[in-house]
Image: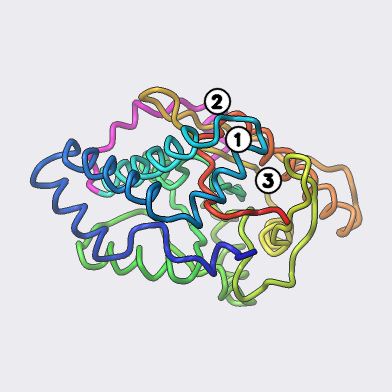
Amino acid sequence: MKKWFQMPECAAGKKRLLLSYFLYKIFGSSILRIIAFFVSLSVFLFNSERRNSSIKFYKLIKKPPILSTYRQFFNYANSLVDKIISFSGNFDTNKFILKNDPNIYKGAFFITTHIGNIEILRCLIEKFDNLRTNIFLQGNFCETFNSFLKTLEIKVNADIFPVEEIDIETSIIISERLKNGEIVFMAGDRISAQNENKVYEGDFLGKKIQLPQGTLKFALMMNVPIYFIVCAKEGKNYIVQAEEFISEKNKKQEKLDELKQAYLKFLEKYTLKYPYQFYNFYQMWD
């Protein structure tokens, strides 16, 4: 069974991001929605590896596998369109519906998932007293987005870090930024290619899966409020839901074990709530 990082890239590379951006600037979002339809159809028809993984997922949660798989691919393609719009500065932030007090978005560590479209939340957060975000991505994605932003001279109130290169210096920088009220986003549902063995096992949808320990350990090390967060589309709006991790444990291992179970519970809850926006296009379970 292939891990996600052993599969061909699913997200857009720099050239495709640039092309999409310029098409949007010239023709508007309609042309990108049309392209999204044909791209998702092409992936559905010709990328058997991703299609079969998706079909297995929908069979597992008892959804019509073929129709559900295409719907998932189409939703993902359209989420990329929304990302392009957000980079242009034209995304309507009135489309965000926050389910939590906005005050939580200060000095907190947010553990994300590949459900929905958490990246576009940045356009709303930047309006919270000019709040700065620190985003951790896999190295190749980090390089792609940094290069894309630099090429177009797009200014964002965020720093993007490669998750594989977290060291003592990075930890000190992030700790200081959190103390100054900045926030951190880091995904907790994909194993790093450089840390395949630093994982934990848990139950997800009745099956055993492996998830990375690094994100959880890093979050606990920062000693700040920890939230699980998802930003998923409902109709024309994006619903933003965060759940705080609260523990009364004192020992580090006990607190870590509790965090593992809480994250798995959160991941399963919102996977079932938004099954067509579950964008892990590989078989997570054995």
Reading the image, the residue beneath label 2 is: 99
- Whichever of labels 1 and 2 marks the residue nearer the N terminus, that label is 2
User: Vertical placement of 160 versus 60: above or below?
Assistant: below
Identify whether 57 is placed above or below 61. Answer: below
Kind of element beneath mark 1: strand
Quarter of the image for residue 13 reads: bottom left
User: Which quadrant of the view contains residue 89?
Assistant: top left
Q: Is residue 222 magenta?
A: no
How far apart marks 3 and 2 lie (CA) works out to 17 Å
The magenta region covers 88-105
Query: Picture coordinates of residue 51 (x, y %)?
Result: 49, 49
**Residue corresponding to mark 3:** 225
Give how far across and how far down residue 64 sits, in percent. 55, 30
The spot of residue 265 in percent (x, y) is 74, 39
Earlier in the chain: of badge 3 and badge 2, it is 2
Residue nearest the observer in this picture, 262 or 122: 262
Circles 1 and 2, Cβ within 8 Å, touching? The answer is yes
Q: CA distance from mark 1 to mark 3?
A: 12 Å
